[in-house]
Amino acid sequence: MIPVHELLARIRWDENFGKSRFVIGYWDRVEGKVLRADLREIVWDAENPAFFDLMDEEGVMHSIPFHRVREVWRGGELIWQRHPPGETVS
């Protein structure tokens, strides 16, 4: 399986591959489940390349480490998935 940081870099920098609509699912420890976000809503953290930033519904910015990414969707199709043992995914 390709590491998630390599897949996200390909989405960002490969013009042909990146033309589709992408959604990522990341593990939210507070909610205890995978939350999804449109990749267009993500801000890449130049100061910390192992994280991306995402604003929640209340307007609070959260830094999310790549290791919490659990799935990547391209055009509605699941193209990448990772679930640690024992993790419940909704």
Image (tube, rainbow, N blue to C red):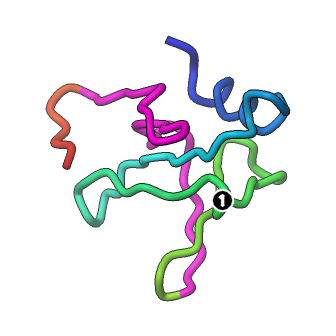
Q: Is residue 46 above or below residue 68?
A: below
Give the quadrant of residue 81.
top left
In the shown orientation, is residue 43 left or right of residue 81? right
Who's the residue at 78% across and 39% down the image? 12
Who's the residue at 23% across and 57% down the image? 32
The percent position of residue 14, horizontal first and vertical second, equals 82, 28
Q: Main secondary structure of the magenta part?
A: strand
The percent position of residue 26, horizontal first and vertical second, equals 42, 48
The percent position of residue 57, horizontal first and vertical second, equals 47, 82
Region in magenta: 59-84
Given residues 31 and 90, the one toward you in this image is: 90
Who's the residue at 44% across and 33% down the image? 77
Q: Secondary structure at mark 1?
A: loop
Q: Amino acid at mark 1?
A: Ile
The percent position of residue 28, horizontal first and vertical second, equals 35, 57
* Residue that sits furthest to the bottom in the current view: 58
Is residue 64 one of those drawn in magenta?
yes
Who's the residue at 50% across and 58% down the image? 37
Q: How many marks?
A: 1
In the shown orientation, is residue 85 left or right of residue 39? left
* Residue that sits furthest to the top in the current view: 1
Binning the other alpha carbons within 10 Å of mark 1 as few (below 14), some (14 to 19) or many (20 upward) gives some
Q: Is residue 63 above or below residue 74?
A: below
In the shown orientation, is residue 71 left or right of residue 61? left
Residue tagged 1 = 42
Given residues 2 and 22, the one toward you in this image is: 22
Q: Is residue 36 above or below residue 12?
A: below
Give the quadrant of residue 8.
top right
